Amino acid sequence: MKQQIYKGKLTQFHWLKIAKKEELTKNTFSLEFEIPENLKENFRFDAGQFVSIQFHAHGKEIINDYSMTSAPYEDKISLGIKVNSPDGATSQLFKNYHEGDELLVSEPNGRFTLISKPHEFRTIVGFAAGIGITPILSHFKNILHNEPRTRLFLFFGNKNSEELVYRDELDRLAKTGGDRLQIFYFFSQENTTNSFFHGRLDDRKLSLIINQILHLDETDEESTIWDAVDEVLICGKGEMIKTLANACYHHGIPKKNIHFELFEEFNDDIYPVEKEFPLLENVELAFKMLGKEYTTVLPTNEERILQQLLIQKFQVPYSCKSGICGSCECILEEGDVELLENEYLTENEEERGHILACMSIAKSKKIKLNFDLS
C-alpha cells in the first residue's frame, strides 16, 4: 500500500519491513529494508540518493531523510543513521523499531548524483565528515563496480577512531579496489602518529592534501593528481561544506564539478554572493501552496523570498535554505527573480521557470509563485 505524504512536495511512501538492524558505534546504527518484488521498480535509485522515513517519536509523527549506503547494484536499501541526542526523534527510531517491523519509506529522492562514465579515465575526490560518509560510500561502491578506469580518493574526518563509522567496509573496499581507491582518515580530537592526519578537514588541510598527497601523478609526469580531478563530492555539516567547496573552487575546480550534500539546516550561502541588485520596496508576492492562494507584501528585496515568507510565518516548505535540497522548489509564473546559486535544479527545469525560493531575490515589483509545481 502506498501513501502520498506532503514533504515539501507530495511524496510517495510505501510500507517496508526492516530486514536488518545493526548498531555500528555508540551513536550510529544501520537499517536495511526488504523490498518486495512488486516494489522493485519504485525503489530503483542512483548512488548518492536518500529516502525519507515516517515514524512515531514522543507521540508525534516524524519524517526524516536518511542517505543510502547501499549501491544500486546491491539491490537493497541500506541506511546509515546517527543518533544526535538521547532524547531526540532518531533515538526513538533506534529504540522502538526492530527487525520485522514495518515503516513508511519514501521512494528514493535527491540529486547528489553523478553521471556514470564507465569508458572514461576519471579522478574523483570525496570529502566526508562523520555520518556524511553514507552517500559517498554509496557512490564509491558504485563507481568501483561500474567504472574500471576511475580512481578514487577519500578524505574522511571524525572526532576520534571510536566514532569512525563503516571503517571495516571502507577498508575492504580499499583492499579490493587496489590502487583505484585510497582512503585517508583524519581525527580532530584524537592524537595521531602523523600530525598531518590530526585536525578538521578545512581549507588549510586541503592545501596540504593537494601538496602532499595529490601531487605527483604517475600517469602524467607533467601534471599533478589534483590537476586531473574531474569531480569532487563533499558531505557533512554546512560550515565544512562551505569551507571545502570554496577552497576547491579557488584551487581550480569549476563549481559545476563540486557536488555537496547537507545533513542539517544551514542558513548561510555556500559561495559568496558577488552581485548587487537595485533596491525594490513593497514587492507584491502571490503564491499557491497545497491548492490555496496567498498574497503578501515583501518590504524590500534585500532578503531572499523564502526567508521573508518564513519571517511572515507562512508554512512554506524548506530544509537547508542553501539551494541544495530542493524542498523550496517552485515555479515562477509572473515577474523576475535572480537565482543566486543552484545545486539542485537542472537546466531544463530552469528553462521551464523553476526556481528555488531560498536562493531567489525579487527583481520586479510583482512576483507570482507556484509551490505545487502544477
Image: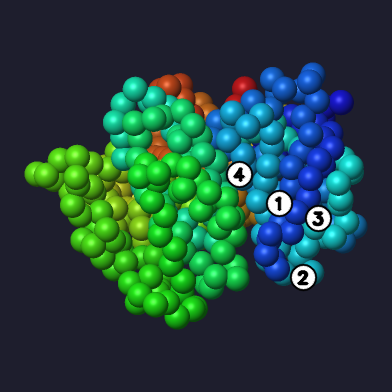
Residue under label 4: 69
**Of circles 2 and 4, which is in front?**
4
Sequence-wise, which precedes: disc 4 or disc 1? 1
**Of circles 4 and 3, which is in front?**
4
Give the residue type that dot 2 points to. Answer: Pro
Residue under label 1: 30
Residues tagged 4 and 1 counted as in contact (Cβ below 8 A): yes
Tell me which colouring the rendered structure shows: rainbow
**Circle 4 residues within 10 Å: few <14, some 14–19, many ≥20:** many
- The quadrant of the rendering that contains the N terminus is top right
Q: Residue at x 78, y 62 (%)?
A: 91
- The quadrant of the rendering that contains the C terminus is top right
Sequence-wise, which precedes: disc 2 or disc 4? 4
Sequence-wise, which precedes: disc 1 or disc 3? 1
Label 4 and label 3: CA atoms lie apart by 18 Å
Label 2 and label 4: CA atoms lie apart by 24 Å
Q: Position of residue 66 (x, y in %)?
A: 65, 47
Residue under label 2: 86
Q: Disc 1 on helix, strand or loop?
A: strand
**Of circles 1 and 3, which is in front?**
1
Q: Disc 2 on helix, strand or loop?
A: loop
